[in-house]
Image: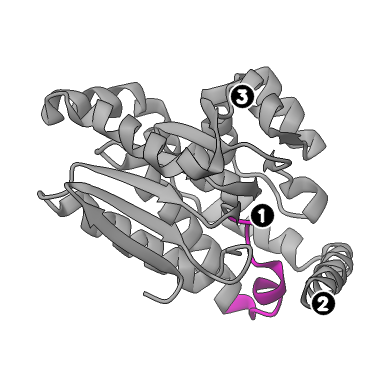
Amino acid sequence: METIVVTINDRVASITLDRGRSNPINHQMVKELTACIKDIEKDGDVGGLILTGKQGFFSSGVDLIEVYGYNEVQVKSFWTDFFELQRVLISFQKPMVAAISGHSPAGGCVLAICCDYRLMAEGEYIIGLNEIPVGIIVPESVFEVYAFWIGRQKAYQYLLEGKLINVNQALKTGLIDEVCPADSLLFQAEKKVRTYMQFNPVTWSQSKLNLRSKLIGHINKDQSTTIDQMLTQWWAPETRAGLEMIIQNLKSKASSVKN
């Protein structure tokens, strides 16, 4: 694994996103995360999972710099596999807690909202789904899981605005469940996972799947039409021009950090 680090401690697995400073999601990370989560689900010696990042960033979302350079076959494969990752996360039968260690916009937020419980580190961090301003069409499955936590009205409004919110706002709206100091984030996340793990695993898991049945139904639908819509807009000249501007800004910020 080159983009994630996996550890297991007394039946609790932790997946730490580990790609560069901000953990941008590329195709390799998508495939490694999907394979790892599938393996953890099948592992009878693992009872729960923590998904986390590094200090300052959970994940900055899709790596626009890399994905912008994908050809038509590569970018279709990327989005197809991203939907599969979302399906695997939403259908995961064991307890899964997000320890959001910093900024978590866009794809980072998608990963977090697939979990059963979200803790976020204190700090001047943002979280939310800003796909529309970037030029990415919001799929129904993303709306449904967002609305599952914050309600349909807020999800609708926030998505159409591309709204990013701070930690306190996220707690107030229900996008996250708990705020804690960065140095106790993983401790509190493990404590929460073990709270779930104390219950009968069959009873807990089947109940989770029952409660998520509509979400699972949405993500199990044929996504080919949605992907085609996303790809058509992805290759539109105005989208490409907007992405070029965003990428230039990202490169400028990265350069200033290095200097």
User: The residue under label 2 is which amino acid type?
Assistant: Ser
* Label 1 – label 3 distance at C-alpha: 33 Å
Residue depicted at 30% across the width and 45% down the height? 49
Reply yes or no: does residue 163 show up in magenta: no
* 199, above or below 64, in the image: above
Q: Position of residue 189 (x, y in %)?
A: 39, 37
Q: Position of residue 150 (x, y in %)?
A: 60, 22
User: Residue 19 vs residue 194: left or right?
Assistant: right
Q: Quadrant of residue 74?
A: bottom right
* 238, above or below 210, in the image: below
Residue position for label 1: 229
In this rendering, does residue 220 appear at all? no
Checking the image for residue 171, the label placed there is 3
Checking the image for residue 255, the label placed there is 2
- The quarter of the image holding the C terminus is bottom right
207 or 74, nearer to the observer = 207
Q: Quadrant of residue 151?
A: top right
Q: Position of residue 218 (x, y in %)?
A: 45, 36
Categorize mark 3 by other alpha carbons within 10 Å: few (<14), some (14-19), many (20+).
Answer: some
- The quarter of the image holding the N terminus is bottom left
Secondary structure beneath disc 2? helix
* Label 2 – label 1 distance at C-alpha: 34 Å
CB atoms at circles 2 and 3 under 8 Å apart? no
Q: Which residues are magenta?
A: 59-73
Categorize mark 1 by other alpha carbons within 10 Å: few (<14), some (14-19), many (20+).
Answer: some
- Of labels 2 and 3, earlier in sequence is 3
* 251, above or below 151, in the image: below
User: Residue 54 vs residue 241: left or right?
Assistant: left
CB atoms at circles 2 and 1 under 8 Å apart? no
Q: Position of residue 86 (x, y in %)?
A: 45, 49
